Amino acid sequence: MYICFMRIDIITVSPGLLESPFNHSIIQRAKNKGLIDIHIHDLREYGLGNYRQIDDTQFGGGAGMVLMIKPIATCIDQLLSERTYDEVIYMTPDAKTLNQSTCNTLSLKENILILTGHYKGVDQRIRDKYITKEISIGDYVLTGGELAAAVLVDSVVRLIPGVIGDETSALTDSFQDNLLSPPVYTRPSNYEGMKVPEVLLSGNFPKIEEWRSDKAYERTQQIRPDLLND
Ligand code: ADE
């Protein structure tokens, strides 16, 4: 019996982009088990006037539209009147990059509100007034924050106890100890002459652990030496 429960609210201009990621596989099962509850809010419903306007040109000139304050503020104020949020997160490329440590921390929260940007992003005053944490998923620019939000939710939700079958497996993932994962193998033990390392078939678990930790270190040194300096 798991008692952990997390509610995630996401504000977006493209709700359809978030349908598929949350309605399949592990996230879907976590919802069915009642471990998480995800609510998507269509910013357009808070738009201004007959055309439900949500964006406008930027002051000072320049290409690209900016999401206006009022529709976002109305939506966030309504949600804040209903419950307290542990974090109000804005997905944006001009922020610190998401890492496993942030995922671990967020997985312990109860209520998270995520705002996704579009076009040139949101009016800075929204960030100043409401946002408690800004997250980028990497040094590249997506068409909007929805896919970034899906990445964030996926990486956080899988850490909640009961969400993935083998709970220990989340703890032995790459990055949990600042190391990449060691190589893994399954049947057959010999594929066209390519053999699985002998130690993995030995049944000697201390030796297997030692081999895995050596390989993890080796791989990290080759591919991501920066992790070893962190
Ligand atoms: N929106 C657009 N690009 C993004 C990124 N790299 N991370 C988070 N949100 C984004």
Image (tube, grey):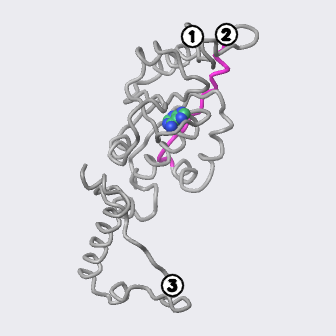
Q: Quadrant of the N terminus?
A: bottom left
Mark 3 element type: loop
- What's the amino acid at mark 3? Arg
Q: Left or right? Give the position of 221 relative to 164.
A: left
Looking at the image, tell me whether mark 2 or mark 1 is earlier in sequence order. Answer: 2
Q: Left or right? Give the position of 25 relative to 80.
A: right
Mark 1 element type: helix
Residue at (36, 38) in percent of width and height: 109
Mark 2 element type: loop
Q: Which residue is mark 2?
A: 48
Q: Residues within 10 Å of mark 1 (few under 14, many from 20)?
A: some
Give, as a single range, the part of the protein colored magenta.
34-47
Whether residue 176 is situated above or below residue 139 in the rendered picture? below
Residue at (46, 55) in percent of width and height: 163
Q: Which mark is residue 145?
A: none
- Nearer the observer, 37 or 73: 73
Q: Which mark is residue 70?
A: 1
The x, y position of residue 185, in whole percent, is: 46, 78
Q: Residues within 10 Å of mark 2 (few under 14, many from 20)?
A: some
Distance Cα–Cα, label 2 vs label 1: 8 Å
The x, y position of residue 69, in whole percent, is: 54, 12
The x, y position of residue 225, in whole percent, is: 31, 57
- What's the amino acid at mark 1? Lys
Is 13 in the magenta?
no
Distance Cα–Cα, label 3 vs label 1: 58 Å
Distance Cα–Cα, label 2 vs label 3: 59 Å
Residue at (66, 31) in percent of width and height: 14
Looking at the image, tell me whether mark 3 or mark 1 is earlier in sequence order. Answer: 1
Pointers 2 and 1 in contact (C-beta within 8 Å): yes
